[in-house]
Image (cartoon, rainbow, N blue to C red):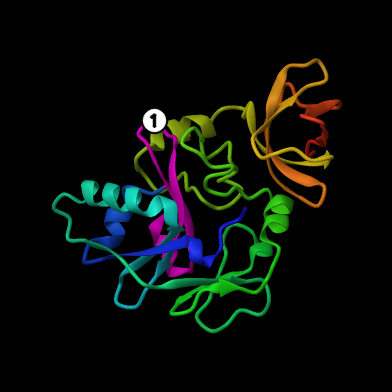
Amino acid sequence: MTTTGADRTVLRISGDEARDFLQGLVTNDVAKLDEGLVYAAILTPQGKYIADFFLAPEAGGAVLMDLAAPLAADVQKRLKLYKLRARVEIEETDLQVRRGTGPAPEGAFADPRDARLGWRLYGAEGGDDGTDWDALRVAACVPESGVELTPETFILEAGFERLNGVDFRKGCYVGQEVTARMHHKTELKKGLATVEVEGAAPVGTPIESAEGKAAGTLLTQSGGRAIAHLRYDRAGEGMTAGEARVHWRPEG
């Protein structure tokens, strides 16, 4: 279910204004490229998810954008639409994505979402080291494009603050107003959580509370655990997803 290196596309954003251009579009602070890989997203004006990606610095001041291949054509089109007269070039590269959780090779970047997710490297060869990525994602509650992340997703409900994917001090970007407003709420009413699962159910199976009310959706599963999108006010003991039983223990 988790994408592999072959399922990724790497775009290159270059030119004198490349970083300034991205700074006005993405959810994270592009200045963090000086420290390594940056995880971020592009949103609609209504604050909903379009795509998430990694930004990587490249020699000469260009920025690489590593994103899920099915999203690449739309994102490239949107970037060119926003470009206007900015001194920026946007192109698809032949670079491949390698990743792993063992010792990082020279030139690799640490995954900024969670230390358990290892490293990423851009070059002529792709692939990974055989890590069970679904198991790691479930344990760390890390969403995946096309599964937990959809056009209806608000990134704070998907854990982007915890995953270092959003910066609330960087200034304006598309969708910033809605995201900031959600951030300043006292608490979110729904979002992603790691749950225990007895049995199995397909991705997308509705979760019901013990009272039979809609309580969420079961998503990626691995080893008796899963990522679920929950309504926190209805989540509790006795939840089911099809024939499977679902258990959630809120943190804290």
Asked if the magenta segment contains residue 168, the reply would be no
Query: As displayed, is residue 22 above or below residue 49?
Result: below
Please say whether residue 187 is visible from this viewpoint.
no
Image position, residue 113 (x, y; %): 59, 57
Quarter placement of the C terminus = top right
Looking at the image, how many numbered discs can be counted on the residues?
1
Disc 1 secondary structure class: loop
Asked if the magenta segment contains residue 32, the reply would be yes
Image position, residue 231 (x, y; %): 68, 26
Q: Which residues are magenta?
A: 27-54
Q: Left of 82 or right of it: where is 236?
A: right
Residue, far bottom: 106
- Residue drawn at x 73%, y 56% is 135
Quarter of the image for residue 118 reads bottom right
Residue under numbered circle 1: 46
Image position, residue 65 (x, y; %): 39, 61
Under mark 1, the amino acid is Gln
- Residue drawn at x 49%, y 32% is 152
Q: Left of 55 or right of it: where is 186?
A: right
Q: Residues within 10 Å of mark 1 (few under 14, many from 20)?
A: few
Quarter of the image for residue 116 reads bottom right
Q: Left of 17 or right of it: where is 140?
A: right
Instruction: Depth check: give the residue in front, 180 or 145.
Output: 145
Image position, residue 171 (x, y; %): 37, 45
Residue, far left: 85
- Residue drawn at x 57%, y 82% is 105
Please say whether residue 251 is visible from this viewpoint.
yes
- Residue drawn at x 84%, y 40% is 199
